[in-house]
Amino acid sequence: MLMSTKLKPLIKPKTIAQFNKKVKDSTGFLIFGSLLPGVSAQVQFLGKLQREEVLWEAQIQTLASYHAQYLNDKSEKERAREVYSFFEISEPEKSVARLHVVLAVPLIDEATIKKTMVMIRCYKRLNVGKHVFGKNL
């Protein structure tokens, strides 16, 4: 399930070049609307999708948070199928791709965000859709 609402960053760069200028002397990503550590974070960072440079607009959240947010109304059988970490990528629009990452970690912190960025940037054959990985809770 992709995020149903658009992310609303404090700083909204219009181009990849503008984003590069904003983060040149910082961490390489922008966090907005989130206090760390927490159960979720909204982040922007640069990467590639299908060999094209994109600005990722990502929501990164814990698996427990995802369950509480999206699976309360599902049956026990349906919830049992949703116990693994995953990420889901939307079709890019104007070089901006939305990314939803759900991780089996207790909290999202800066180190988790950096590891997630590395995972996405290094993932072979990254494409649009849902990718399940890792262990369950």
Image (cartoon, rainbow, N blue to C red):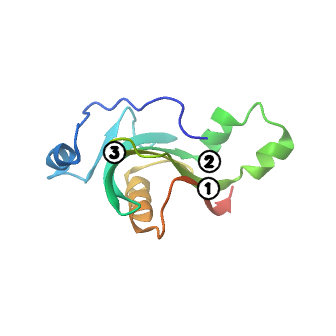
The answer to whether mark 1 and mark 2 are in CB contact below 8 A is yes
Q: Earlier in the sequence, mark 1 or mark 3?
A: 3
Pointer 2 residue: 63
Against 71, is 136 above or below? below
Residue 14 x %, y %: 23, 37
Real-space Cα distance between discs 1 and 2? 7 Å
Left or right of 80 in this view: 56: left
Question: Which amino acid is tagged 1?
Answer: Ser
Q: Residues within 10 Å of mark 3 (few under 14, many from 20)?
A: many
Q: Earlier in the sequence, mark 1 or mark 2?
A: 2
Secondary structure of residue under mark 2:
helix
Residue 76 x %, y %: 84, 42
Q: Earlier in the sequence, mark 3 or mark 2?
A: 3
Real-space Cα distance between discs 1 and 3? 20 Å
Question: Which amino acid is tagged 3?
Answer: Gln
User: Which part of the image, by quadrant, shows the C terminus?
Assistant: bottom right
> Residue at the location (37% across, 51% down)?
110
Question: Which amino acid is tagged 2?
Answer: Leu
User: Looking at this view, is 59 or 54 the one in front?
Assistant: 54
> Residue at the location (48% across, 63% down)?
126
Q: Nearer the viewer, mark 3 or mark 2?
A: 3
Left or right of 102 in this view: 113: left
User: Which part of the image, by quadrant, shows the N terminus?
Assistant: top right
- Residue 44 is tagged as 3
Secondary structure of residue under mark 1:
strand
Residue 19 x %, y %: 21, 45
Q: Residues within 10 Å of mark 2 (few under 14, many from 20)?
A: many
Pointer 1 residue: 85
